[in-house]
Image (cartoon, rainbow, N blue to C red):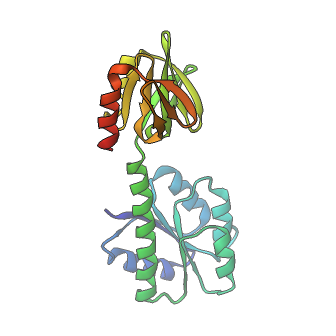
């Protein structure tokens, strides 16, 4: 895994210095170098970038101006010769900032922080299983672990989630196949429950996130076994 980087600095010498540091780092790869913010913004539109090395003091459009113009900026390591910008950098949620002249040790420390952030973000995305369902003529992303239970409504099923209810055209049997079997169980002809959301149960009912749901008699043993294996 390498972070895809761009360098944005109006100084050719400074870009060369950073480029050498990036090229010698095993976790980085350069996608582009830009001498001004306008070129950089166009480059960001056309490339998938993980990290920007961004000079603060550039003519016409500063590094801070560029950050303000981006809707969803990647990680940023600011480069500045002025320590007064350090506090302002925190307002832009940058990963780190480097003072000129840049030392190898300080550069490596900043990159280590960026790599750790990248790995954490991507680990969370991998852990967060989701499915897409069609509701009200549009595709919706539903995080699987947000589903509390599923209820049959004739030709439709209702997903009761942390974010509200989602009604989709589907049979219970069809939708059940989309759910991980180790996390969900059909405990009644009209209900599938998220095993991790169960608060308590008896022979006849289950309480899921405060809601009372009927439990079929022949499903009680299967439920107990499933809860034991979570």
Which quarter of the rendering shows the C terminus? top left
- Residue displayed at 41% across by 56% down: 122
Residue 72 placement (x, y as % from top left): 58, 54
**Position above or below: 213 against 228:** above
Looking at the image, which residue sits at the far front? 203
Residue 136 placement (x, y as % from top left): 58, 20
Which quarter of the rendering shows the N terminus? bottom left
Q: Nearer the viewer, residue 186 or 28?
A: 186
Q: Is residue 14 visible?
A: yes
Q: Is residue 143 visible?
A: no
Q: Viewed as shown, does residue 7 lie left or right of 119? A: right
Looking at the image, which residue sits at the far top? 154
Q: Viewed as shown, does residue 12 lie left or right of 62? A: left
- Residue displayed at 45% across by 89% down: 103
Q: On the image, which quarter does residue 176 sit in? A: top left
Q: On the image, which quarter does residue 163 sit in? A: top right
Q: Nearer the viewer, residue 4 or 209?
A: 209
Q: Viewed as shown, does residue 100 lie left or right of 5? A: right
Residue 139 placement (x, y as % from top left): 51, 27
**Position above or below: 139 against 155:** below
- Residue displayed at 38% across by 33% down: 184
Q: Nearer the viewer, residue 170 or 229?
A: 229
Q: Nearer the viewer, residue 16 or 110?
A: 110
- Residue displayed at 43% across by 81% down: 109
**Position above or below: 22 against 140:** below
Residue 130 placement (x, y as % from top left): 43, 38
Q: How many marks?
A: 0
């Amino acid at each position: 895994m390498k972070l895809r980087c761009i360098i944005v600095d109006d100084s050719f010498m400074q870009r060369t210095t950073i480029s050498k540091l990036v090229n010698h780092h095993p976790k980085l790869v350069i996608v582009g170098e830009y001498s001004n913010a306008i070129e950089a913004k166009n480059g960001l539109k056309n490339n998938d970038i993980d990290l920007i090395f961004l000079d603060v003091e550039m003519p016409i459009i500063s590094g801070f101006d560029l950050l303000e113009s981006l809707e969803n900026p990647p990680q940023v390591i600011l480069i500045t010769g002025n320590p007064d910008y350090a506090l302002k950098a925190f307002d832009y949620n940058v990963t780190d900032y480097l003072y000129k002249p840049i030392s190898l040790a300080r550069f490596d420390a900043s990159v280590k922080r960026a790599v750790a952030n990248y790995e954490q973000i991507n680990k969370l995305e991998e852990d967060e299983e989701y499915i897409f369902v069609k509701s009200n003529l549009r595709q919706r992303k539903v995080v699987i672990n947000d589903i509390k239970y599923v209820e049959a409504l004739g030709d439709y099923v209702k997903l009761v989630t942390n974010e509200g209810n989602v009604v989709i055209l589907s049979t219970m049997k069809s939708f059940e196949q989309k759910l991980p079997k180790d996390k969900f169980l059909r405990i009644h002809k009209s209900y599938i429950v998220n095993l991790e959301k169960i608060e308590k149960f008896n022979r006849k009912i289950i309480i899921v996130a405060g809601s009372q749901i009927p439990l079929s008699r022949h499903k009680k043993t299967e439920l107990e076994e499933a809860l034991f294996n979570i």
